[in-house]
Amino acid sequence: MASKLPVPVDETGVNVTTLLPGEAVDVSYRVQLADPFPLFTTQVRNTATVTSQTESSQATSIVPVEIPDLYIAKTSNATGPLLPGEVFSYDIDVANIDITPQNGVDVTDSLPAETTWISTSVTRPVDDTVCLVDQRFGLLFCR
């Protein structure tokens, strides 16, 4: 006979204490995939372990993850609370992870009203081309 116990699962695990012969416990928990999700990762593998004073066993679940062929991730270099007037960056990584070219690719980002645009740089790691755009002078250079 299975008994369902509402117990939390965290980094320290769940202490079920004693299981009598034939008794079972169902432990379930919800998770959310990271966003942005690591590039070229197509599955999440999770292994659970149960141990007692005399036995141990493991079970693994593999969940497939579908990543769009045109991948985008956005981060910021702000490491904590900022003061008004401080400058920080948003970084947007875009990748075509398909085997066919993606044509007409545009990257847009609406800035929050609480920020003022200063400059933009674009780097193409394939050929190390960097272009710098400044709010006062427009396109400055590409190298």
Image (cartoon, rainbow, N blue to C red):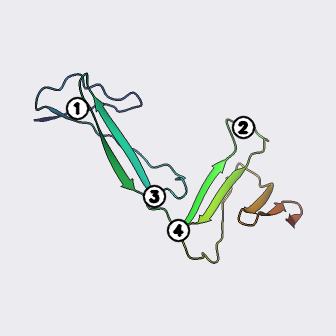
Q: Relative to residue 19, is residue 82 depicted above or below? A: below
Q: Is residue 15 left or right of residue 36?
A: left
Q: CA distance from mark 3 to mark 4?
A: 12 Å
Q: Are marks 1 and 4 in contact (CB under 8 Å)?
A: no
Mark 4 neighbour class, 10 Å CA radius: few under 14, some 14 to 19, many 20 or more = few
Q: CA distance from mark 2 to mark 1?
A: 44 Å
Q: Quick check: 129 left or right of 81?
A: right
In the rendered structure, which disc, 3 or 2, sits on the residue that comes first in sequence? Answer: 3
Residue drawn at x 50%, y 65% as measured from the top left: 68
Say which residue appears at 78% left-offset and 59% top-offset.
121
Q: Sequence-wise, which precedes: disc 3 or disc 4? A: 3
- Front-lying residue, 1 or 22: 22
**CB under 8 Å between callouts 3 and 2?**
no
| Residue that label 3 marks | 42
Q: Is disc 4 in contact with disc 2, using a CB cutoff of under 8 Å?
A: no
Residue type, mark 4 in image: Asp
Picture coordinates of residue 14, whole percent (x, y): 31, 28
| SS under mark 3 | loop
Measured as percent of width and height from the top left, residue 120 is found at 78, 59
Q: Mark 2 or mark 1: name the one nearer the start of the chain.
A: 1
**Spatial distance from mark 3 to mark 2, Cα to Cα?**
36 Å
Q: Estimate the x, y position of residue 31 in percent, counting from the top left.
A: 40, 44
**Mark 2, residue position:** 82
Tell which tag, 1 or 3, sits nearer the viewer.
Answer: 3
Separation of marks 1 and 3 at Cα, in angstroms: 32 Å
Mark 2 and mark 1 in contact? Answer it, CB < 8 Å: no
Question: Circle 1 sits on which residue?
Answer: 5
Of the image marks 1 and 4, the number of the one nearer the N terminus: 1
The amino acid type of the residue labelled 1 equals Leu
**Above/below status of 100 relative to 73:** below
Q: Amino acid at mark 3?
A: Thr
Question: Which residue is label 4 attached to?
Answer: 69
